[in-house]
Amino acid sequence: MPYLIPPDFLQFDTDTFRTSISKYIDRKVDCLMALNTIRKRLNEDYDALSLLDALPPHTSFQWICIPSHSHMAIQIGNVKDRDILAFLVQLGDKPYEVRYWSVQANRPVSGTSHTVLSQDDVVRLSLFAPFKYNADTSKSSKRKFSIIIKWYFMLRGLLHDGVGGDYNDYCKRLCDALRKIYAGQQMDKDRGRRGDQIEGSRQTPMTVDESPEPDEPKSPYRLRSAPQTIEKHVRLSPQECIATPAKTPTSSSKDDKTDYDRLRSFLDSHGILYLLDNIPEANAMQFVTQGFIPEAQPKKLFLGRHYKNDCEIYAYMRPSRDWHEIKFTLEDPRRPLNITQMRTEDVAKQRLLHPFNKTFPKDGPIDQGDRARLTLMVKWYFIAAGIATNLVLQETKAYPGRLRCALEYIANRMGPAAAKPPMTRDASIPRRSRLHDTSTIDESQIQNSLAGPTSSPPHAGQSLDLPAPSSSTTSRSTRHKPNIPTTTPNIIQTTTTLPSHPSPRGTKRPAPATTSSEDADFASLAATLSQDQSLTKQINAIDEELEKLERKKEIFMEAWEKEHKGVVERRGMVEEERGGVRKRFKRISLKVAGGGEE
């Protein structure tokens, strides 16, 4: 096992050299004894020695010398051409503590070319195995993270005081960290086996493909389709979850549709496809290529900015166990490594883009349903952009119904400015047409009533059809002419409601008054609705202006407070200087009055 020789070995004084040798041997003995004690306790008390031996050896990592601090550092990660280093420092007689640096990759380390990182910053970065499996911001995970790093320094022979505390507590935490590492390694192996058939990524852990078939040319997202006989036993089709059995398509159409197509079909089948008009399309959103989380989707979604420092807020879609989860980060474009993970309830308090700012109430606390609604809409845009093509519906069967509820909630938050359902006036137009048809029929009936007395009722064998006017009609009317009564007073008495001189076209019945009143009501309603929408848009525009003014006010107040503080401090310094001048003036005055000299 190679060890680093301390610098005090290079002293030429014989006594000092012997003392250094003695201390070095004692340290190595203590280190070996600590290693043996830890291995023994892990084996006897926790039966976890196999987990310890399964860790990568310390020789598999890159160890870098830091000349300015006389330390050896281990590389635990790499982010955007910068290496993440961890090394040990000891302050006085205190136990060794872990410190973290970020240095430029493939360049010598100097005292000025590094960036100091906190453990909270490090655990959010892309780290190597096995360190990444205990990377978390909780207090217990931080201690486990440090224990694993110190273990490698102990193996390297650079941690001389061993545990430096209670072995029982140390071994218990080390065992928990080892079990978490083992669980993470198994998850990575399972995810790798499930995602071997996905081209160029590990983005679809639920898809299984057992034959190396070529890419399907009809698929726009280059997703390989598994044979139907295999896919039937692997997972349920998303269409079976979003459609009734009567509407479920055939198996030949399942492979040609993505989650986006299925969701649109679901919304269309429920008559709520118009709700998508309330949110921007996917091509209007900003997706950025990311390398911060390698196992996540290749792009991250821009959501908005922080209300104080204008840092950018992004959403990542990464696998977690058997589903994909959404992670939010706060990133400073001027400092690429300044990435902070955000909670969902904290994201909701920032300046978000539409429609993400409509997924929670404007005022009041953020509950679990609001958080789920925000992450659900983020997943929708990953689906609509073609990044997550066939993942979400396989993992969350209830996603279509939840998407419907989220879209309805957004429409409710938008108020009158939301898109309205398609206008179906089938119930009103036929009614009005029936009114007009009735008036036409009444005219013909009037004409028939006028002509009725001039013709006798048809015989039993005579047809009731009225053919077009012809010579036969004339002869037929001539044949029945003797049956017409010749006394006109009877006609006048039987038709007292008709005018005395009826026109040949008959008397036209006036249109019902209800038709014109309905037209006026509809016109008034349409004008009122249009005016309401116009006023609502004006109110929304004014609200946006008020929000901008509030943000300008906050920025101005921050700048004012900073400037005011500086002026007050400067005044204090000048006032202090003036006090000194006055004291000196007083001393000089006293000396002059006493006849002395300064």
Image: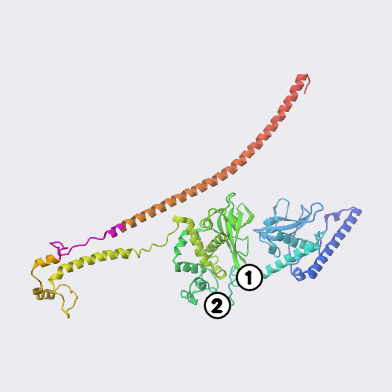
Residue 503 lies left or right of residue 18; in this view the side is left
Q: Residues within 10 Å of mark 1 (few under 14, many from 20)?
A: many
Label 1 to label 2: alpha-carbon separation = 20 Å
Which is more toward the observer, 532 or 555?
532
Which is more toward the observer, 403 or 432?
432
Horizontal and vertical percent position of residue 396: 56, 68
Magenta segment, prevailing SS (helix, strand or loop): loop
Badge 1 element: helix
Taking the magenta stretch, the answer to whether it contains residue 62 is no
Region rendered in magenta? 495-517
* Among numbered discs 1 and 2, the one appearing first in the sequence: 1
Residue 81 lies left or right of residue 40; in this view the side is left
Residue 13 lies left or right of residue 570; in this view the side is right
Which numbered disc covers residue 191? 1
* Amino acid carrying mark 2 in the image: Lys
Foreground mark, 1 or 2? 2
Badge 2 element: helix
Residue 149, quarter of picture:
bottom right
Residue 231 in view of the camera: yes
Residue furthest to the bottom in view is 461
Q: Residues within 10 Å of mark 2 (few under 14, many from 20)?
A: few
